[in-house]
Amino acid sequence: MVNLFHLIWFLKAEKRMLFGNGVKSKQIMSKGRILLDKRVSGFSIKIMKIFLLILLLTIPLFIQSAWAANIKLTWDPNNEPDLAGYKVYYGTSSRTYGPPINVGNVTTYTLTNLTPGKKYFIAVTAYDASNTESSFSNEVVKEPAPIDFDQDGKTDIAVYDVTNGWWFFLYSFDGSYGFDAIGVGGGAQRVSVAGDYDGDGKTDVAVYDTVYGWWLFHYSSGGYFYDHAGQGGTGYTAVPGDYDGDGVTDLAVYQGSTGHWFIQYSSGGYGFKALGGVGRIPVQADYDGDGTTDVAVYDVANGWWFFQYSSTGGYGFDAIGVGGGSQWVIVPADYDGDGMADVAVYDTVYGWWLFHYSSGGYFYDHVGQGGTGYTAVPGDYDGDGVTDLAVYNEASGFWYFKYSSGGYGFDSLGGPGKVPVK
Amino acid sequence: MKWVIILLAFITIFPGSAFGATLNLRATWTANTEADMKEYRLYRTDGTRTLIGTIPHPSTSYNFSVTVPDQSSGTLRFVLTAVDTNNNESLDGSPASYSYNLDTIPPAAPKNLSVQNQ
């Protein structure tokens, strides 16, 4: 991901990014991220260059490191008098599991040494004293954190330089910085569509050509590639997602004039769905919690949400009740931690977040910063599996967080002309 | 009086009656060699010791039935004794057991499985 050219350029760019906006005498320590604490002098810049050089040279080593994730399972106890215990099954595709783990007669168990960035499907069975085993419980899905370039299970801060097509990263695992570029340049014609297209558990750098519909990738597993969903370009919006539930991002486009969705599945073949139309923008996410992206649209004028659930093929509707309009932007994600995306909107004027939790109830929240000049960038920055609130100020390159695990955070990456990767 | 050793063999099950399921079993053993042998006595020893049957010498097998609850599972235990013509009864021979499993109804599937990062 980092070559010598990038490195040299990055050292120059980093100087501008880190110190070019008048940031000084600012001690920042947030969840292990980088700290800066001195007025920058010529000498300290040299020291910083050396420091960054060491960091960058070690990035590939760190990125190759094996990270392990643990997840805790809980379930309700059975009430059969001859119940003897439970077995936990898990795998990387729905209802296809490896050998079970006999966990005994308990109702909680922690799966260990899972690979961050991978999607896991999990179910439990009960067995009695005769070793007669029940059918599977409901299946739960452990979704990987979005925008996770370093595969540590946490969303990384990243920005895309629209003019030049450059990508800048602040890796969550050690607070180091990274840079990448696909090499086709920038411009408003190309938008970032980061996702795990190669299925290795790391987010890949990717852009979509809004005029011709081409997708260009720099795979985290190596190599530059391009592809096309068959449809796309002018009049279409890129809507990448995991529509086949295999843990690999699929290419997909939405045609706003017709409400037609064209999908190229990573598992093979093409798909078509019809939902939406004029005035309705795509808002695909996993609303039913089955590990597969659902097609969905948001009626901008009225604030209405329409879904087609992948689990049943049925349709759904929702609304938060604050109406529509351009003041609100859509930010669906799993804020309540139940494995299903929640209906959510962000107030671009005042910075309020409004939710209709899939687990029930309407809520609102605020990061402390936000509104005009800020962009909502929800993600799992603390790696707890629950979406955190976050906003990015393009003028300053500042990021503000309200973690689902508690507390607030701050970071700095980007600036004018650099849009957040989300 | 020598001890006797029995073996049990499962024959058939007649499940589903109002009184439970019937296990048809067969016990086999090695004959005693005493000249005054009269009979063998087969006891069921799981729970209250119960005489299952009296089998004249020199027979070395016995078919019998045991009724167990429907959809149950468990282990039945038996012992055999030898009796001579003066009604002197030996100590119990080595016990034999038979495990059965008529429980074909699985537990309910667990409910409300949830997952959290740790």
Image (spheres, helix red, strand yellow):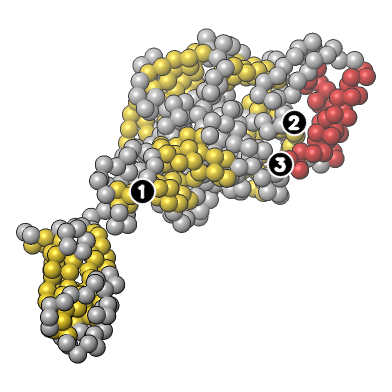
From this view, report whether residue A250 is shown above or below residue B29.
above
Q: Depth check: give the residue in front, A48 or A301.
A: A48
Q: Work out how far the residue at label 1 is from the one at label 3, CA to CA, in angstroms.
A: 40 Å
> Are dots 2 and 1 in contact, CB under 8 Å?
no
Q: Classify residue A95 as left or right of residue A233.
A: left
Query: Looking at the image, is mark 2 or mark 1 earlier in the sequence?
Result: 1
Do the residues marked 1 and 3 share a common chain?
yes
Query: Looking at the image, is mark 3 or mark 2 earlier in the sequence?
Result: 3
Q: Depth check: give the residue in front, A383 or A274.
A: A383
Determine the secondary structure under disc 2: loop
Give amino acid for label 3. Answer: Ile
Q: Work out how far the residue at label 3 is from the one at label 2, CA to CA, in angstroms.
A: 11 Å
Q: Classify residue A75 as left or right of residue B40.
A: right
| Front of the two marks 2 and 1 | 1
The residue lying furthest to the right in this view is A43
Q: Depth check: give the residue in front, A1 or B48.
A: B48
> Which residue, given by chain and number where applicable, does mark 2 sit on?
A176
> Which residue, given by chain and number where applicable, does mark 3 sit on?
A63
Chain ID, mark 3: A
Is residue A143 visible from the viewing direction of this image? Answer: no
Q: Work out how far the residue at label 2 is from the one at label 1, CA to CA, in angstroms.
A: 46 Å
> Are dots 1 and 3 in contact, CB under 8 Å?
no
For the point 26% across and 42% down, the residue is A79
> Where residue A101 appears, x then y in whole percent?
45, 51
> Which residue, given by chain and number where applicable, does mark 1 sit on?
A85
For the N terminus of chain B, which image quadrant? Answer: bottom left
Query: Looking at the image, is mark 1 or mark 3 earlier in the sequence?
Result: 3
Number of callouts: 3
The residue lying furthest to the bottom in this view is B35
> Where residue A187 appears, x then y in whole percent?
69, 31
